[in-house]
Image (cartoon, rainbow, N blue to C red):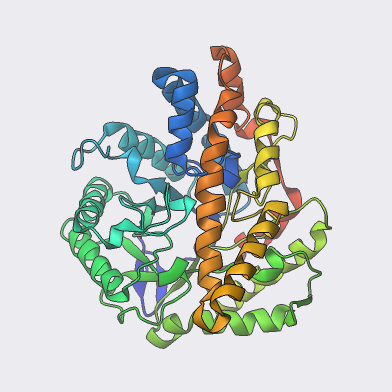
Amino acid sequence: MDMLRVRSGHIVDTAGRPVRLRGVCLGGWLNQENFITGYPGAESAWRDALASALGPERAEGFFKNFLDCFITDADLAYLASLGASVVRIPFNYRHFEDDKHPGSFKDTGFTRLDHTLELCRRRGLYAILDLHAAPGWQNPDWHSDNTGTDALLWEHPGFRQRTVALWAALAERYRSRACVAGYNLLNEPVAPDPEALNQFYREVTAAIRSVDSEHLLFLEGNHFSVDFSQLEAPFDENTVYSLHYYVTPGFATMSYPGEHLGKRYDLDSMAEDYAERRAFMTRHQVPCWVGEYGVVFKNERSPEDRLRCLSDLLAIFERFGDHHTYWTYKDIGVMGLVTVAPESPWMVATRQGRDHKRLLSTDCFAMDRGDVRIQVDHLLETVGSLVGRDCLDLDRLRSRLYRAVFGVVLSEALLPSYAAAFKGLDQITLEGLADSFRFERCVPRREVAKLLAKTFRLPA
């Protein structure tokens, strides 16, 4: 495989030929997420809850089995068969560094990543290494493994120094690996001061370039990778800029094409919106990679609208000649290209816990509003009537309250009972739960696979 480079606004191979990176994100694996596998809250809290239920040693054994089963050569072979050219590998820093021993890197994370990269190479797949959860948390949400609501990476220099050091170690190890397309420096940052984000990007870039001058760097916009307005002009010639593009008809209960809350959504309107989102890339003539996009499949409505929306998204990306990775590859039936079988041991064992989550609406990303959310909305209306709407940023208050109530407080309350379903299970049963995520036992979502494969196989 060729080491990739940026030339004249395009990603090219060593012969200067254009390369298109089209593939999927391996979400929920080296960085677990609650809606992908079913637990409440943040990954580290889930791990702690299971350790309390099973004991630390048995819990660690379960998570090792889970990682072994979730992504194997069979998964990568399937993606290669669809024509994918790249996988994005989101990872949690905790696989490489322990908070109790900052600055001391663990071999286990590197060894697992080494193995997966070798499998990618054999299948002809490039890999983008994505720091999805940084020390101190780069955003306030569950997907950065945030157990609260504060993004402390931007407040404490020590967290930023640890992040820079981790990237230097990764670049040192993988600088000669051509199957590594490059380094996605930080997933969905939310920096209150945009200058802090610009400075962070410069520091990480300098650390990586001190040991690795070859690999691509992938930089995301602020506020969950949608805002590029305050990013500095490109300062490294081998850099790709990455936006995330989730659209209303991919999530809301609506017909597509159609209207939602008075706004029209169709191919033309989304293409116009997308052009505005990538204006930074257009202005600076740098490659654009849609690091995440996707649609949610809900049981109460027809999937055809979602599939039409997904088809139009792919058409828009191709119209602009952009690179893209679908979010996400495998989950329990929310939006994955591959889903865990509905009657698998995992789905049976976690059914009650997932029902409790649904009743309390604790999956902020993909769940409909339940009765509890309506009650919180009533609370917001009461606050607005008390203090006056002119004195209140209601959208900000709603966002903060939803995160605190649903993402943290109620999720924490559910975790012990969710983990209790694993208590007393013998080793064979626990292994069977993890084995539910093995590709051979999962179900590909064939309509999505067909759409993605058609696009993946287009010429560069």
**Residue in view at x 59 percent, y 56 percent:** 365
Observer-nearest of 382 and 337: 382
**Residue 9 image offset from top left, x and y in percent:** 40, 78
Observer-nearest of 141 and 329: 141
Observer-nearest of 42 and 311: 42
Residue 380 occupies quadrant: bottom right
**Residue in view at x 57 percent, y 56 percent:** 327
Instruction: Residue 52: tell me if it is visible.
Output: yes
Residue at the outermost left position: 210
How many labels, in total? 0
Q: In the figure, 144 relative to 320: above or below?
A: above
Apparent side of residue 407 relative to residue 133 in the rendered image (left or right): right
Residue 267 occupies quadrant: bottom right
**Residue in view at x 48 percent, y 50 percent:** 142
Residue at the outermost bottom position: 283
**Residue 232 image offset from top left, x and y in percent:** 30, 80
Residue at the outermost front position: 386
**Residue in view at x 52 percent, y 34 percent:** 72
Q: In the figure, 25 relative to 78: above or below?
A: below
Residue 206 occupies quadrant: bottom left
Instruction: Residue 1: tell me if it is visible.
Output: no
Apparent side of residue 453 relative to residue 415 in the rendered image (left or right): right
**Residue 288 image offset from top left, x and y in percent:** 46, 73
Observer-nearest of 287 and 341: 341
**Residue 100 image offset from top left, x and y in percent:** 23, 36
Q: In the figure, 280 relative to 368: above or below?
A: below
Q: In the figure, 295 relative to 45: above or below?
A: below
